[in-house]
Amino acid sequence: MTADSITFNKLTSENYISWKTEMEAFLKVKGVWEFVNPDPKAVSLNTEPIRTWHREQNQAAGYLHLALDESQRAHIKDAKDDP
């Protein structure tokens, strides 16, 4: 699976919920989710191994989300940050 480009629908006035979850997964896979939604614990600890671990955890969560059919995503909505 490649995540080099956005392959889901752009945001419209009717698709915010699905767009939001797709965009979050995409940003996690790209390793930039922490800039959109910073983790105060990781920032306060400010150690590179911890930040790297959180970044890679987010990437894994994003890949898993993008590999699921939309009909199955409701089953993981509460665990989306914990692959």
Image (cartoon, helix red, strand yellow):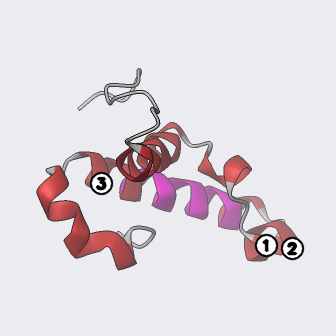
Q: Position of residue 12 (x, y in %)?
A: 45, 32
First of labels 1, 3 by sequence position: 1
**Along the viewing direction, whichever of 50 and 71 lies nearer the viewer:** 71
* Mark seen at residue 65: 3
Using the rendered view, name the quadrant where residue 3 is placed.
Answer: top left
6 left or right, relative to 47 = left
- Name the residue carrying label 1: 40
Q: Position of residue 32 (x, y in %)?
A: 62, 42
Does the CB distance between marks 1 and 2 fall below 8 Å?
yes
- Element assignment for label 2: helix
Task: Considering the whole magenta stretch, tell me its main secondary structure.
Answer: helix
Q: How many marks?
A: 3
Query: Given the current orientation, which residue lies at the most extreme front position?
Result: 13
Residues in magenta, as a range: 50-60
Residue type at mark 2 is Ser
Q: Is residue 22 left or right of residue 1?
A: right
Q: Identify the residue shown where x is 42% and y is 27%.
A: 10
Q: Which mark is residue 44?
A: 2
The three-letter amino acid code for the residue at tag 3 is His
